[in-house]
Image (cartoon, grey):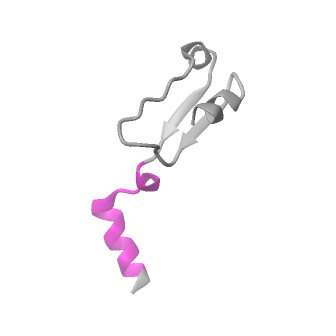
Amino acid sequence: MQDAFESAREGWGRTIILGVESQGTPMSINTWSMMRGKTVTGSFFGGIKPKSDIPLLAQRYI
């Protein structure tokens, strides 16, 4: 994850994290890079809303 962040372009680079290493494992990033425009975005289950999206997906499947 850290390598992905470091390879993002300064100014508008975005790193999207879809998985995790071990639960509670810290990720160290250069805060100066964030000040220069890089961003990190995380996603839990792809950004779905389980309460509303899972019944909709189940209905579409059936």
Q: Position of residue 42 (x, y in %)?
A: 47, 41
**Magenta segment: does it hold 32?**
no
Q: Magenta part of the protein: which range?
A: 44-60
Tell me if 11 is positioned left or right of 49 in this view.
right
53 up-or-down from 31: above or below: below
2 up-or-down from 47: above or below: above
| Residue at 48 percent of width and 48 percent of height | 19
Tell me if 62 is positioned left or right of 27 in this view.
left
In front of the other: 43 or 3: 3
Secondary structure that dominates the magenta span: helix
58 up-or-down from 53: above or below: below
In front of the other: 17 or 53: 17
In front of the other: 9 or 52: 9
Tell me if 20 is positioned left or right of 7 in this view.
left
**Magenta segment: does it hold 47?**
yes
| Residue at 41 percent of width and 49 percent of height | 44
Count of numbered circles on the image: 0
Q: Quadrant of residue 38?
A: top right
Tell me if 53 is positioned left or right of 5 in this view.
left
Q: Quadrant of residue 31?
A: top right
The C terminus: image quadrant: bottom left
| Residue at 36 percent of width and 80 percent of height | 59
| Residue at 57 percent of width and 37 percent of height | 1
Q: Position of residue 57 (x, y in %)?
A: 40, 73
